[in-house]
Amino acid sequence: MTEEMKIQGINGPVVTLPGKTGLSMSETVYVGHKRLIGEVIAITDEKTTVQVYESTTMLKPGEPVFGTGYPMRCMLAPGLLSGIYDGIGRPLDKIEEQSGAFIGSGADIPTVDCEKKWNITVKVKVGDAVKAGTVYAVCPETQSIEHRMIVPVSVSGTVVRVADDGEHTVLDELIAVKTEKGEVSLNSVTYQPIREPRAVSERMLSNEPLITGQRIIDTMFPIAKGGAAAIPGGFGTGKTMLQHQFAKWSDADIIVYIGCGERGNEMTQVLTEFSELIDPKTGRSMLERTVLIANTSNMPVAAREASIYTGVTIAEYYRDMGYDVAVMADSTSRWAEALREISGRLEEMPAEEGFPAYLPSRLSAFYERAGYIRTLSGDMASVTIIGAVSPQGNDFSEPVTQNTKRFIRCFWALDKSLAYARHYPSVNWINSYSEYQNDLFYWFDNNVAPDFSALRIRLGAILQEEDRLMEIVKLIGGDLLANDQKLTLEIAKCIRVGFLQQNAFVPADAYVTIKKQYLMMKAIIGTYDRAAGLTKEQIPVSVIAKTGVFERLTKLKFELTSDDEAQANKITDEISGALDALEASYSGEDK
């Protein structure tokens, strides 16, 4: 230990060391006698600055700092699924066993259990040539997910030693590879720097949607697998609940849920719900394909900044096995606030609203790690990132929201007035958008129905027209509108209440297949066209409403219990029959 490697100053989570210390940029260090985990974030001739990921209470100047020689990294191995970790990848259940309900200082516990044995099957034999991306062993991590051990990027050569199939810990050697630089031993563990994206073979254009079961998302504003989306909304608009729905019902193989800076009770709710929820894919617990990163608002602010990198690194790890992974970050505003606090302690020049000038580049570094890719193994896989944004005062012009829009292609704007009216999801259909619609056009038309996209466009046009007509109604009232305009308002109401609004507490409506969404759209537009024909015959919309067809459309989401086309046709035939009867009774002298 040299004199230069002792603490000079402490400012919250920021610790400074005097002079040149020999430490490297982004190197992981242990700070003080309690060996708090930190990371080097700045080096000058005068001082070295360290960001500490634990509480620095009771830390004193003069205490030693120990370098590790490696960057801030995440331990990747079987056992990650079903676990809950803090912002730097430490398992919270193991920390609780060691120090109780509160995290003790200097708790340096491996991310996965190094003593647990896994039933591992080696997939290569002596003499096989392996390279980056080769799957050399597999094991059942859970009953629904197979864990695949992949040769790292730096290794290429010939297998010279192979372990027997059977029970192994993650640290046991599985194969040995002879490379140009010598023999390399491979076990089940990979260490990945959290701020460096994992290598891929090729980034592809995604033409397949991530189906969420939420009608306003899948039909109106879809997101592609490998896409990036933001959910901005003020307090109480339902950002967290919408992400919970995505995590529960989306057709991703694995979910990584990052609670960065949100309230602890929200993470408790996630744990409670997911442990009780049955995965519709496997019939088993939802936790079996979920990883939870919890760095709540009462945890160290510096670790909050690292938490989203830890989460997306784990997501990329499973992506490289060939899985589709969805990352839920709740919320990136709290993460940006951590950047602002640390930047302030570093005495950096602030930009808009006190956020650091490098906020856009940090947001970019996060969202750009989403993608639909060809892995080094040759599989097609994806990481989809959905980040919640919590603008203060519901102000979408603030820096985090505006800079986020630069790096995402799907924007689901939550509306406070809809939320307070109990309209769930409270996604505003006027302010939201998805730039993936054109990319997914052929998938919907080829895999759902040839007229799916055409019906979606008509649905959106009706809602846009309603928005225009409501401005007129505010000025002159609804009675002076033309008959066809009154019909537009009635059908728009059916779309809003019967299609866009969804009840998460009703099993038939919590998750809706894409086929059922299409059948509902078809019924609504079919009724609209039929009713439009009646209005041309001067039949008042008020008279059409008395047949109950609009009310029937509103309740269609409950009446149509599945994606059975025969049942949907029966309902639409009954609606058409009621309108035919009205037309017949309104003809001749009665007209």
Image: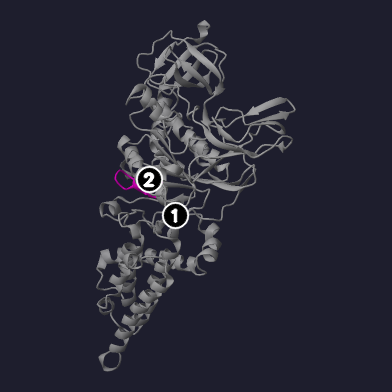
Question: Which quadrant of the structure image shows residue 428?
Answer: bottom left
Q: Looking at the image, can residue 350 be seen? A: no
Quick check: 134 left or right of 325?
A: right
Residue 378 coordinates in the image, percent (x, y): 65, 46
Foreground of the two, 30 or 587: 30
Label 2 element class: loop
Closer to the N terminus: mark 2 or mark 1? 2
Q: Quadrant of the C terminus?
A: bottom left
Label 1 element class: strand
Q: Which residues are magenta?
A: 231-245
Residue sitting farthest toward the bottom? 589
Quick check: 141 left or right of 280?
A: right
**Marking on residue 123:** none
| Amino acid tagged 2 | Phe
Foreground of the two, 34 or 551: 34
Q: Looking at the image, can residue 139 be seen? A: yes
Residue that mark 1 sits on: 433
| Amino acid tagged 1 | Tyr
Q: Residues within 10 Å of mark 2 (few under 14, many from 20)?
A: some
Identified at 48% across, 35% down, the residue is: 79
Mark 2 and mark 1: span between their CA atoms?
14 Å
Residue 566 coordinates in the image, percent (x, y): 42, 74
Question: Which quadrant of the structure image shows residue 337?
Answer: top left
